[in-house]
Amino acid sequence: MSFKEKIDISKLPKHIAIIMDGNGRWAKQRGEHRVVGHQHGVTSVREAVEAAAEIGVQYLTLYAFSTENWNRPKEEVMALMQLLVSTINNEVKTLNENDIRLQAIGDLASLPPDCLAELKEAMKATASNKRMNLVLALSYSSRWEIINAVKQIAMDIEKAKLSAVDITEKVFESQLCTAGFPEPELMIRTSGEHRISNFLLWQLSYAELYFTDKLWPDFRKEDLFEAIVDYQSRERRFGKTSEQLV
Ligand code: FPP
């Protein structure tokens, strides 16, 4: 029985977030440049998107480029940006055919102008699609996002639009890049690293974390389905006892 067949469709996570890790190691194992790993990673992106859409996941968020990734060697950063531009450009048609909306979170203004322009164009072209939301985290870091939200709230207080006593989780969430998205119930990280690395720190508060040793370029549909089957075997207590859940 395949992992796909084992999935209980009535208990699907609405939102899955993935830290796509291990492209560099995958390339190194083959004596190739790191960029070759990123290029092969695009196939895995396609597999993950197709798999999530096939079974009815509503949101898939992929950590494609962190704020910290700007510190990588210049050639790698440029190659990654180029890869993003070409991938987005190549995939818009398929996204539209499959009714998938492209969105992005992060400090988008820091992206190179051609990359930002391509991204905006693709987001506009797919804006009315309804089947699934594909969210790319680009130049994203959770601490940056949280500081941004705090600044916004502080400005609203300065302008007397808000009182400090009225700050609630809901108010705070409304200032995050993910405002309006359901919280991710499942976070997957590839490559055997067991870290969150500044990814969706607020939003992952109650997410189930799933780690696989597979390197991202080797990740295929069945790997996503396996993660979902594992997620469905977990008891999500949200601070309650098992008995209270019955
Ligand atoms: C982490 O592997 C991966 C990245 C920093 C980039 C991910 C980008 C892609 C898969 C390409 C295109 C994506 C989209 C959404 C179009 P790493 O380089 O940190 O690997 P390592 O830990 O083995 O060095």
Image (spheres, helix red, strand yellow):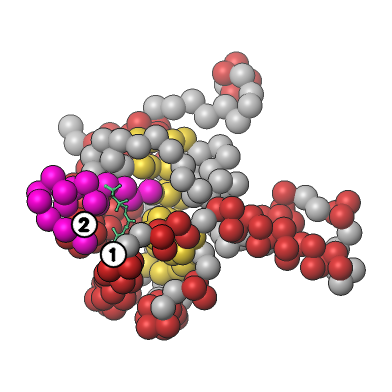
Magenta stretch: residue 179 in it?
Answer: no
Between 9 and 47, the one lying in front of the other is: 47
Looking at numbered disc 1 in the image, what kind of residue is underneath it?
Glu
- Disc 1 to disc 2, C-alpha distance: 8 Å
Kindly identify the residue that appears in the image at 81 percent across and 67 percent down: 156
Kindly identify the residue that appears in the image at 85 percent across and 64 percent down: 157
171 vs 242, left or right, is right
Q: Quick check: which quadrant has ligand 1?
A: bottom left
Q: Does mark 2 have its CB less than 8 Å from ligand 1?
A: yes
Residue 74 sits in quarter: bottom left
Q: In the rendered view, would you say 243 is above or below 17?
A: above
Q: Secondary structure at mark 2?
A: helix
Residue 17: percent from the left, percent from the top? 43, 49
Residue 232 showing in the rendered view: yes
Residue 144: percent from the left, percent from the top? 59, 58
Kindly identify the residue that appears in the image at 24 percent across and 51 percent down: 24
Residue 39: percent from the left, percent from the top? 20, 62
Q: Which mark is residue 34?
A: 2
Q: Does mark 1 have its CB less than 8 Å from ligand 1?
A: yes
Give the residue at the far top of this rendering: 243
8 vs 33, left or right, is right
At label 2, counting other C-alpha atoms closer than 10 Å, the crowd grade (few under 14, some 14-19, many 20 or more) is some
Magenta stretch: residue 24 in it?
Answer: yes
Kindly identify the residue that appears in the image at 19 percent across and 36 percent down: 2
142 vs 164, left or right, is left
Q: In the rendered view, would you say 1 is above or below 89?
A: above
Chain part drawn in magenta: 19-35
At label 1, counting other C-alpha atoms closer than 10 Å, the crowd grade (few under 14, some 14-19, many 20 or more) is some
Looking at numbered disc 2 in the image, what kind of residue is underneath it?
Arg
The residue where tag 1 is placed is: 76
Residue 148: percent from the left, percent from the top? 65, 62
